[in-house]
Amino acid sequence: MKTAASCAALVFLLLLRAGSASAALPVDDLSKPFSISGQWRIQLGDDPAWAAVDLDDSSWSLTTVPAAYPEGHAGYTGMLWYRLTLDLDPSQPSVLDNLGALAVTLGDVMSAYEVFAGGQRIGSVGRLPPEPQAVYDHHQTFSIPTSAIDSDGRLVLAMRVWRDPGAPDSWETGPHGGEYLLGNVGDLREGMLQKALLPKLPLAVLYLVLGLYHLLIARRNPVLKEFFWFGLFSVAMAGYTFETSQSRFFVDVPYLWHKKIEFLLLYISPFLLGRTLLAVTRTPENLLTRGFHLVFLVYFLAVLLVPGAGIMQRTLASFQYLGPLWALSMALIMGWRAFHGSRAARGVVALMVLLAAATINDVILETPLIGSGNSLYIVFAFMLLFIALMMAERYTEILKQLEISVEQRTAELVETNRELETAVETKGNFLANMSHEMRTPMNAILGLTHLGLKTDLDDQQRDYLSKVERSAEDLQDIIDSILDFSKLEEGQLSCSSEPFSLAAMVEGIERTWKETAEEAGLAFATSVDPGIPGALIGDGKRIKQVLGNLISNGVKYTDQGQVTLSISRVSQSEQAVRLGFAVADTGIGIAPEQRDKLFEAFSQADNTMTRQHGGTGLGLSIAQRLVELMGGHIELESTLGEGSTFHFELELLAGSDDLVVEEAPGEIDLLPIRGARILLVDDSELNLQVAGELLRQAKLYVDLAEDGAQAVEKALAGQYDCVLMDVQMPVMDGYTATERIRAEPGLGDLPILAMTANAMPQDRARGAEAGMNDYVPKPIEPDELYRALLKWIAPGERQFDEGEFIPAGSDEGTSDDLPNEMPGIKVSEGLARVGGNAALFLDLLRGLCKDYADAPERLESMIASADQDGARQLAHKLRGIANNLGASELGACAESIELALKSGEPVADDALSRLRAALSLTGESQAVLSPAQESGQVGGGLSEVEQQQLLDELLDAVAASNPEALDVADKLLAGLSEDSGIREPLTAARDSLDIYDFAGAGTALQALENSGAAAS
């Protein structure tokens, strides 16, 4: 009986429990997330006690979770509760293993909620009244504490939901989308992360990259508007895709911001897409498209400016219908464009129809006909891909057009370049011809003015002629500056690297500028750091030219005070020294705003300076370019009204101390080597004359050889103290001759000095390898020649006959009768190289003009017949002779041709034109100089007795191989009449004496004696 009563009580309790709670959802497998979607209990209202486990919810209504509209309880508002009871089976291993790590994932819930497990609050999304905040579509995972589960496995889940009363009635209530799962917390969170990242986040990144790429193209090509609009559209779609994904909740900002950004991007996207399609199909905007775009912009601004979420809900209702209408209108417009031949518009028609259909399917229809409401994203992806392909095709088309345009422009540039080259060549020819045409009358002006100043003049006449001479010299400087600038522009000026004495250079600058400064009422001073090495290696000539330009500028623009040249040592190593050069003046100074154009060609700091001080404005430009060629840069420091300082730094190699000598020019003591025998080797008769005269004046015996083979033969037969060896010669060059001489016994110590204009390191190395001891650079400077001889010839007493070295030209005109410089000829330099012998200098100059008058034609013929070696040797000889005689411009022209031939480059036509002009200029100056020299000589006819005496004297001198024979022959020829019977053989003898060919002169005179011609 008791047993029956107990059983009845147990059945009653079970029935009582069943009546007080809903049926539980059994859970027997948690090896993977378990879906808790399905039938939940729902109750309107709000009571915190409804979260309790033992609540009897059997009277609550049943609803589907999640439930979309209209099943999603449309019209419900305010607070409502959802409950679900789960019956976990602990006997199952998967359930038992996860009891301590359970969690629940909830999908989309309208509008905010709290979640409870076993009566315990485990989390929330959004905020509930009294200060509610809606957060839509935020999927979340909540951990379930073990204490929430009964010992028998019973788990009660409850959601306290608030639905925003401001939401449209057609919107769902409570859970309406997404997944609702129970499972291991790690598995659920990993699944949520994957769903948050895929697939929308990769699409957002792809859209962003696509947009930035097209914006970059548009930035580089602003005219490509379609790329700009499509880039913005792609970036907007990237942002919208991100803001409609769960990834947006990784960015911790207020939820309202997320929604604002989402709606802003949603409303601006059709505007950007419309602009893109109109641009890519070349369709003009019409009233329809303009109206739609204006509405979208108004929606955009409304969401941007109006606070709260209400404006988004109100605008979205109408936008859902405007979107498809706009897409269909764009489809019609694109169809019309396609009908009229736009290939790009055809694909756009299909895209717009798809976009309208997807919008209707996903947004307007209560139940989507296709898919699950994601067709819009699929259409977006296809649309972006299609437009990107259109952009790529458009870009390819643009590139093809650009290539065609580039080809056309390249052809135009080639033609323009050809015209420019022709213009440059024409300019070069013009400058060469201009210099020739201007210098031709200048020759007469300078030469005749010089002669006129030596005549008896009254003070006024002398003043007039002096001013003419100074003006002509100024004009000569201007012409030289223009030609230097032209050569710099054409890259024809280069800097050499040769030993030079800094002290000698400064001394020369002082001699040149001190008198000029004093004439202007200024002081001129120099300051040189005593620690600077005496011998340096660099382009001393160009440095001197730069300093001269800067000093000239200082003297010109200084009214009182002084001009100072300072040279300091900036730094020094074992092999090089860095020098600082500065030229300071106390002149007018230069304002800061005028300094920028100071080094520009043909410009001055102030145009008024040209009127006040003259000048071409080229001096500083040339100086700057020369300094830059040498690796420096001229800087300026100036104070207006106080003066200016131009300074620059150059790094120069330190030369040998052997090059530093204390003697001043013209004061070298040659007594220790007087009477030494020199073998002079050169294939140029004129060079033999120049060097021979210098050696004879030094009271040295000279023997001559015209090529390397003769030099070897004479070196073996004679006893010489030194050999002066040219390098480039026919038959046998100087290097080979030196090697042959060195190979002979007893000649290993014979000093052999190279005479060459090639002073580059590789040339010196080649000479040293052949056995040459040193070199004397061409053009020959007498002092350098004498120093080299003193260095290598052993001092000592030698047999010497003073009578054989009677000073020449004692009764002839002197160098004082000649100007220091003529156009194309630096007379003072040429005279110095022949020891001041004016007659010899003019004779050599005549020979140069005569022997090389056809040099341009010979060079042109050799080049045309591919005789490069012959042309190079001819240019080399002309260069050396011209430089020896001070015809530096002619020498420079020949040098440029020689260098081109040496490097295998073609010789420019204008190079030969410049050579012709330089030869013509030299010849004209020589014609002016010759009368100047003759005017200083004793003229007039000779009596028959005087002629016979001079003839006997000449025969004796030739028999004794006395170099004085040349002067006697000149004197005799000068006193003969033009129809004299002995003039022709006497001229032949004199020509032989020109090259110290005493045997040939003797033969010519012997024929004269044998004929018995009278000296008449």
Image: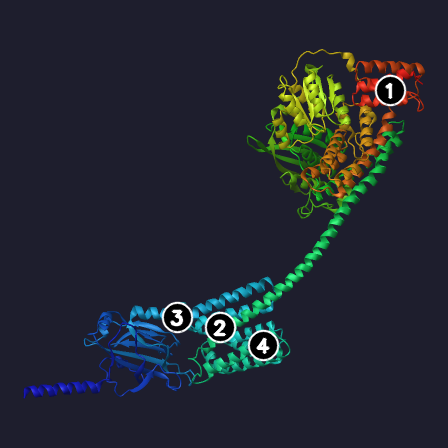
Q: Residues within 10 Å of mark 1 (few under 14, many from 20)?
A: many
Q: What residue type is disc 3 on?
A: Ala
- Label 4 and label 2: CA atoms lie apart by 18 Å
Q: Which residue is mark 1?
A: 971
The disc placed on residue 268 is none
Where residue 180 sits in the image (x, y, percent)?
Answer: 33, 77
Q: Secondary structure at mark 3?
A: helix
| Kind of residue sitting beneath label 4 | Arg
908 or 179, which is in the foreground?
A: 908
Q: Which residue is mark 2?
A: 381
Question: Please, is residue 116 above or below residue 647 in the view?
Answer: below
Q: CA distance from mark 1 to mark 4?
A: 106 Å
Q: Give the distance between the C-alpha atoms of the residues marked 1 and 3, in whole angstroms.
A: 116 Å
Label 2: which secondary element: helix
Quadrant of the image occupied by residue 882? top right
Q: Say whether residue 44 is visible.
A: no
Residue bearing the label numbered 4: 346
At label 2, which amino acid type do we have? Answer: Ala
